[in-house]
Image (tube, rainbow, N blue to C red):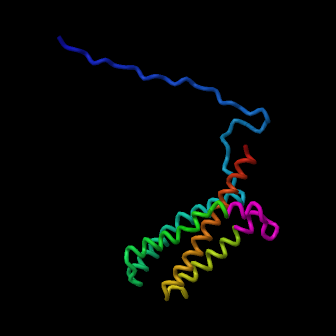
Amino acid sequence: QIVKPVRRRRARLAAVPVQRSDDGDDDGRPPSLSLDPEVLLVVTCYFLQGALGLSRLALNFYLKDELGLSPADLAALTGLASAPWVVKPLYGLLSDSTPLLGYRRKSYLALSGVLGALSFGAMATVASGTTEALLFANLVASAAVALSDVVVDSLVVEKARDEA
């Protein structure tokens, strides 16, 4: 006796009506992406944080190949450079409780940008001569990026809260 394979029908999904808001703003079109300055600032900061991985890679090769540091020293320095990321909640408390030049977010973001630019510039020029100066500049750069991350994350939370 020949057994015929059983064919199964695919389940069809029922169409669910879209819930419309009662405030009159919904015209049936999907929401559009707003390109206001805060959104561009957030996107730029997150992009730069991702791109900084390349600079960390170059720094590790420089420390290993040019300055002759051992893998154990590199591991210790990587741990030291991540120290500012451990105290991120303190940056949030500071920026929330202490306005700088009248602003809670923008001034801290500008400060972190200036500190980051100066420290990366120092790593590329004057600090590259000695290990200690290079490590200090790397620590300041890491702190600047961690501060900008906290501020940008708080901007995202505020924007989401305002739109909800």
Q: Residue at x 40, y 20 (%)?
A: 9
Residue occupying the point 62% across, 71% down = 144
The N terminus, quarter of image:
top left
Q: Is residue 41 visible?
A: no
> Quick one: 22 or 161, which is closer to the camera?
161
Q: Nearer the viewer, residue 73 or 39?
A: 73
Can see residue 76? yes
The spot of residue 31 in percent (x, y) is 67, 43
Q: Residue placed farthest to the top in the image?
A: 1
Residue at 78% in and 69% down:
100
30 within the magenta span:
no
Of residues 117 and 127, which is closer to you in this image? 127
Residues in magenta, as a range: 91-108
Q: Position of residue 107 (x, y in %)?
A: 74, 69
Q: Is residue 95 highlighted in magenta?
A: yes
Question: Where residue 94 sits in the image (x, y, percent)?
Answer: 72, 64
54 vs 65, left or right, is: right
Q: Residue at x 69, y 61 (%)?
A: 92
Quadrant where the C terminus sits is: top right
